[in-house]
Image: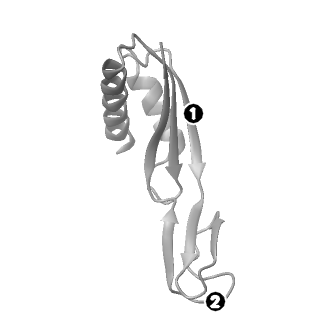
Amino acid sequence: MHEYSVVQALLNQCEEIAEQNNAERITKVVCKIGIMSGIEIHLLQIAFDTFKEGTMCDNAEFVINEQKLKLRCRECNDEYEIDEIIYKCRNCGSLSMETVDGEDMYLMSLEME
């Protein structure tokens, strides 16, 4: 389960940012996770709840915003978001698609005290 290593890296990043801002604790962590990131959201939540104990995120709320797959057609330049993984333009039918968003995980914001 790679979600554990993802959470460890996330907690380390949160603590580094908090220390840089002279914060004593983190009260909220907001992440954006793409549906193509390979991360199971429910497992990430479990891992966060497990590993946050004893860190600056000990009592932090963990907010996960799921990012749909955002595609752009290289032929007609149509750009749209979809829930399912279909790399075919809904406008012109082209298979020449570019992924704009939905493949990564991002730390979007922290609330600190």
**Colour scheme shown:** one colour
Residue at x 52% of width, y 83% of height: 74
Amino acid identity at mark 1: Val
Task: Give the image location of residue 111, x and y in percent.
Answer: 51, 23
Number of other residues with Cα within 10 Å of mark 1, as a class: few under 14, some 14 to 19, many 20 or more: some
- Quarter occupied by residue 56: top left
Residue 93: assigned label:
2
- Quarter occupied by residue 4: top left
Q: Are marks 1 and 2 in contact (CB under 8 Å)?
A: no
Q: Does residue 36 lie above or below 43 as drawn?
A: below
- Residue that carries the numbered disc 1 in the rendered image: 63
Judged from the image, the secondary structure of the residue bearing numbered disc 1 is strand
90 left or right of 112? right
Judged from the image, the secondary structure of the residue bearing numbered disc 2 is loop
Residue at x 44% of width, y 15% of height: 58
Residue 13: assigned label:
none
Residue at x 59% of width, y 82% of height: 88
Q: Seen from this angle, which residue lies furthest front?
A: 21
Amino acid identity at mark 2: Gly
